[in-house]
Image (cartoon, grey):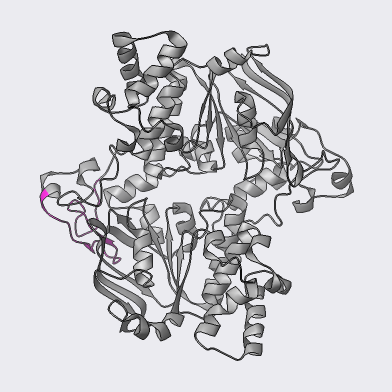
Amino acid sequence: MTLLSVKDLTVRFRTEDGPVLAVDEASFDVAEREVVALVGESGCGKSVTALALTGLLPRNASVTGAIELDGSQPSRQARGRDIAYIFQEPMTSLNPVLTVGRQIGEVLRKHQGLRGAASRRRVIELLELVGIPLPSRRFGEYPHQLSGGMRQRVMIAMAVACKPKLLVADEPTTALDVTVQAGILDVLRNLRDEIGTAVLLITHDLGVVADVADRVVVMYAGRVIEQAGVVALFARPTHPYTRGLLDAVPNPARHADGGLREIPGRVPVIRTPSEMCTFSDRCWYADEVCRSTKPLLAPGPAGHLVRCWHPLEADHAGA
Amino acid sequence: MPVLEVLDLVKHFGPVRAVDGVSLRVDSGEVVGLVGESGSGKTTLGRCVTRLVPVTSGRVIMNGTDIASLSRRALRPLRRHFNIVFQDPSSSLDPRMTVGEIISEPLRLHHIGSSPQRRARVDELLDQVGLQREMARRYPHELSGGQRQRVSVARALSASPSLLVADEPTSALDVSVQASVLNLIGRLQADLGFACLFVTHDLAAVEFLAQRVAVMYLGVLVEVASREELFASPRHPYTQALLSAAPLPDPVAQRSRNRIVLSGEVPSPVDPPSGCRFHPRCPVAIERCSLEVPPLRPVGPSGALAACHLVDDSGAAPALT
């Protein structure tokens, strides 16, 4: 069952340097209990997409397109209740003068009217859910007394306190060490298994994607350029950019010897809707068609959705 | 012939024991990867080696001279023999200097060459790091992150040092740009033959670039081995856990591997645990581990080093599940 459906989401910013088209007709779905990774490099529009879903964009942004939850456009209130959001840096989103228990309790009081012992019981249950040891002791501690990994767990506990249908996690492990990251990724997996939350994971880290995602949406310069199941995407990328991204990551299985693949040039800043493939000036296969006509996201080889005039066939894409 | 030999190096910041007795050698033409998580002391070690911070005790022997105890004045002429590339090129390049001035600064400081010779050297370096010669007249803010990091590399190499310390040179960059900087450092190292201490938390980057790898945990080295040996058969339980925690960019392999999840977090370097510093988190620790500090000693026939009571002299290591 489709939980979240994003159709032609477009986000423009008015800036001092002129307009910026941050997201250009992005469309994708997230099914119930599904972990979808939204992947791309800086400036691809992945975080702006996440902010648009949760209604957290700044005032200089204008948003068009449709966001549907369970088949209908959610009210502001439903969006706040059903879509939760966690950020990269937990310390900036936790209140330093409130104890962990009080912060989570506040959410429960506001949205579910829980107070006193019932609230405390539920907070401890949530701390257990996110794998915090000795939850009854942590209840009375302040954010500064916790490590980075524990803070991120508290953020997740707070985000899922009201049983959201979708958790949007924007680079939740980027600021953490790998041994701590492994634990947080386990928590995200557990949420799905234990309370059935779907997760939209925004990340640039292909290792994290390989570890937890069911499906992958790749963005480049504001556009969704490829979508596929995680195994299919890594085994057989069909957009040249996806292929380039996978080849750029050091991976002994792919680079027995020789160098890493580089993608020449840099990500363009898109100001107005462009009538070309925005990757064409960096693409190895680009021709006149790519430079003059915008490709659409359409079924391509291996059943991937791909926005490319010349998607890679198996012989190009094989590892 | 070692370019750099660090002997029992200690660096304390007040009560913080950031580096607490590290010995490490980097041979001529060799790339040694120094890996560890935050708080392991790897960055501090890189800064001690380049004498950007004073050393508390121990020796840093650079090309035969102990620079740990030299005065700043005595050190100055030796500085041309080593240099460092930092993580964030936007804060390590002077925004008021042109790229050409930045790259030729080490040459000016060490009075190397005449002014036309320095200009020619800047051109040569720009060629080597893959930037157009016209870039010499630009300012850092006009460049992308990857281009700035290329400028940092060119500056570090301009006086032809025998040792380059690269401190997380790719961590602030996007994946596709990381690839080009890793390729660049690898190619220049092979062409020019300088030794390199590559400090990073990124295991995949180390596996790509380094010939030998040293693993640091809470101020001490726990394992040193060749790249092949370390990645194929890590011995120290911390190394095993670290390798298993870094997700592979391959969903099939990643989901079928045996993962070791460590309990707890890295303890404070103010009051490190007794005995082996890893023992409170080690899944296979025995009583001896909390009592006796394990020395970094040769294990196995290849000359690999490990600091663990449970790794025996033949190199057999404890299995973690």
Specify the quadrant that holds the N terminus of chain A.
Answer: top right
Which residue is drawn at the image coordinates 38% and 53% (left, top)? B232
Q: Nearer the viewer, residue A313 or B274?
A: B274
Horizontal side of residue B28 vs A250, given as left or right: left
Would you say residue A177 sits in the magenta stretch?
A: no
Find residue B230 and report its image quarter.
bottom left
The reply to whether residue A258 is in sight is: no
Magenta stretch, main secondary structure class? loop
Q: Nearer the viewer, residue B40 or B188?
A: B40
Count of numbered circles on the image: 0
**Magenta range:** B291-318
The reply to whether residue B64 is in sight is: yes
Would you say residue B296 sits in the magenta stretch?
A: yes
Horizontal side of residue A117 vs A215, given as left or right: left
Q: Nearer the viewer, residue B208 or A23?
A: A23
A26 shown above or below B270: above
Horizontal side of residue B86 vs A30, given as left or right: left
A84 shown above or below A20: above
Q: Residue furthest bottom?
A: B114
Task: Measuring from the top left, give residue A282's x and y in whole percent.
Answer: 75, 52
Task: Measuring from the top left, give residue B257's x and y in whole percent.
Answer: 41, 38
Task: Measuring from the top left, give residue B254's x and y in whole percent.
Answer: 47, 39
Which residue is drawn at the image coordinates 46% and 81% (left, top)? B80
Find residue B282 and report its image quarter.
top left
Task: Measuring from the top left, give residue B104's x and y in whole percent.
Answer: 58, 79
Q: Nearer the viewer, residue B315 or B195?
A: B195
Which residue is drawn at the image coordinates 38% and 75% (left, top)? B27
